[in-house]
Amino acid sequence: IENYQFDEIIEAYNNNDLIKKIYTDSPVILGIISIALLPFIEEIFFKYVLFKNTDCLKKHWIIKTLIIGLLFASLHCASEVIKLDITAFICMFNYFIFYVATNIIYHKKENLMMVVIIHMLINICAVVLM
C-alpha cells in the first residue's frame, strides 16, 4: 500500500470526520444510523456480549468495565490512536467516561434498553450540535 492510500484509510476511520461527511452527504441516513442503529448495536456488543456474557473477570466487574471501556474508546478514536495524535487522549477520555458511566448504570439496573436510550440521547445531541 502506498503511503497516501494508507493515510486515506486512516482518515476514513476518524469517527467524527466520518460522521461529518455522512451528515453532509446524507443527513437523513446519518440520523437513522447514528441515533437509532449504532447505539443499539454498540450497547448490545459492548454491554451484553462483552461485559455480561464473558466469564473473564466476572467477579471483578469494575476492572472488566475499565478494560472494555478502553476498547470502546479506542475503537471510537482509532485514527487518532494510530497516528499517535495528542487529541486521541481527549477523544478517548470522553468515550471512556461515557462507557464507564453507562456501564455502571447497566450493572446496577440490569436494563440494556436504559443505556441504549441514554446512548441515543447523547448521539442526538452530537448530531444537533454538528
Image (cartoon, grey):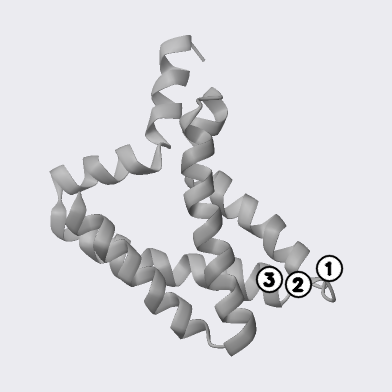
Give the Cα separation between the discs numbered 3 and 1.
Answer: 9 Å
> Mark 1 is on which residue type?
Leu
Q: Position of residue 69 (x, y in %)?
A: 62, 57
Q: Is residue 101 left or right of residue 17?
A: right
Residue at coordinates 55% horizontally, 49% vertically from top-left?
Answer: 73
> Mark 3 is on which residue type?
Phe
- Disc nearest the viewer among 1 and 2: 2
**Residues at marks 1 and 2 touching, judged by CB atoms closer than 8 Å:** yes
Q: Position of residue 41 (x, y in %)?
A: 46, 68
Give the Cα separation between the discs numbered 1 and 2.
Answer: 7 Å
Q: Quadrant of residue 117?
A: bottom left
- Residue 26 visible in the snapshot: yes
Q: Which residue was labeled with disc 1?
A: 57
Above or below residue 82? Residue 26 is below
How crowded pointer 3 is (Cα within 10 Å; few <14, some 14-19, many 20+) is rated as many
Q: Which mark is residue 51?
A: 3
How crowded pointer 1 is (Cα within 10 Å; few <14, some 14-19, many 20+) is rated as few
In this view, the residue in front, 54 or 117, is 117
Residue at coordinates 71% horizontally, 56% vertically from top-left?
Answer: 67
Q: Secondary structure at mark 3?
A: helix
Q: Which residue was labeled with disc 2?
A: 61
How crowded pointer 2 is (Cα within 10 Å; few <14, some 14-19, many 20+) is rated as some
Give the Cα separation between the discs numbered 3 and 2.
Answer: 8 Å
Above or below residue 68? Residue 44 is below
**Residues at marks 3 and 2 touching, judged by CB atoms closer than 8 Å:** yes
